[in-house]
Image (spheres, rainbow, N blue to C red):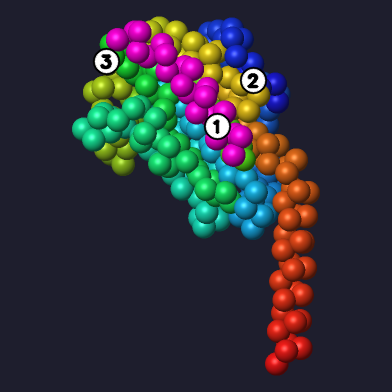
Amino acid sequence: MDIVTIDRQGEKVRLDSISAAPPKETDRDEAKRELDELGEELFDLQDLLWGARMNSVLIVLQGRDTAGKDGTIKHVAGYLNPRGVSVASFGVPSEEEREHDFLWRIHRYTPRQGELAIFNRSHYEDVLVVRVHGLVPESLWKERYGHIRDFEEMLAEHGTLILKFFLHISREEQEQRLLAREKEPRKAWKINAGDWEDREHWDDYTQAYEEALSRTSTKGAPWTIVPSDSKWYRNLVVARTLVETLRPHREAWQERLDEVGARKKAQLEAWRKGR
């Protein structure tokens, strides 16, 4: 898979030059088989993460309406053990949240060691929606890029593995998905006039996303741009990226668990001798 990953601040991003469709040579059935294999490995890696308590994992999902944030959570997180997994969705801030700094409501949901947290939208709304709709002065949201980098650097320094995914969908595919909600009774509950209104700001959102991706990409918190016109390919890219990020930690986590196991075994033997 030739996936665009940005891990250097200031790297230029042009979303219009990145395809939202899967590569032509990608076979859907093979992708499903690989996803299942990755899911099994992901479950094992999460088990080591939970037991070793040396790291935590934060997954950030951002994307335009209908890009598939909920679907990604359903199909990728479905391979995980619910124990140790949390999902936080960030909508319009409450009155209490608006009375604090913009990261206050975010920090409370970051994962503890051993845990994996998924953000369905995130602190990035405060340099996206607020910018496009002029909810705060430009002088304020521009400073937030630096605050976000510092915030994520702090999390990384304390052992959080950060994966940020921009679910990249084309304007044509988004329209089809929005119209499908009107045609299918079981999806009608998702209808929101605001989604159509935001389509009128497509170019403004493109610029906002491009700058956010460019200015907040770092080695410790890279962005992966996920082609999301095909849901099955989107799920594969997210799962593969997650497994490839966790896999290098397998040995260290296993060593920690072996140490803990040996210590507890010795404690049990001492208890038996002392009976």
Is 111 contained in the magenta span? no
Q: Which residues are magenta?
A: 137-158
Which kind of residue does numbered mark 2 sit on?
Asp
Q: Residue at x 43, y 24 (%)?
A: 124
Task: Name the disc covering residue 154, or none.
Answer: 1
Q: Residue at x 40, y 41 (%)?
A: 108
Circle 2/circle 3 CB separation < 8 Å: no
Furthest toward the left, the residue is 95
Rendered position, 17 above or below 237? above
Residue 249: where, in percent of width, then height? 73, 44
Specify the quadrant that holds the N terminus: top right
Give left or right: position of 255 versus 167.
right
Rendered position, 132 above or below 218? above
Specify the quadrant that holds the C terminus: bottom right
In whole angstroms, how far apart are the C-alphas of marks 2 and 1? 16 Å
Q: Which residue is mark 2?
A: 7
Circle 2/circle 1 CB separation < 8 Å: no
Which kind of residue does numbered mark 1 sit on?
Met
In the rendered image, which quarter is residue 189 located in?
top left
Mark nearer the N terminus (2 vs 3): 2
Q: Which residue is mark 3?
A: 135
Furthest toward the front, the residue is 274
Residue 44: where, in percent of width, then height? 68, 54
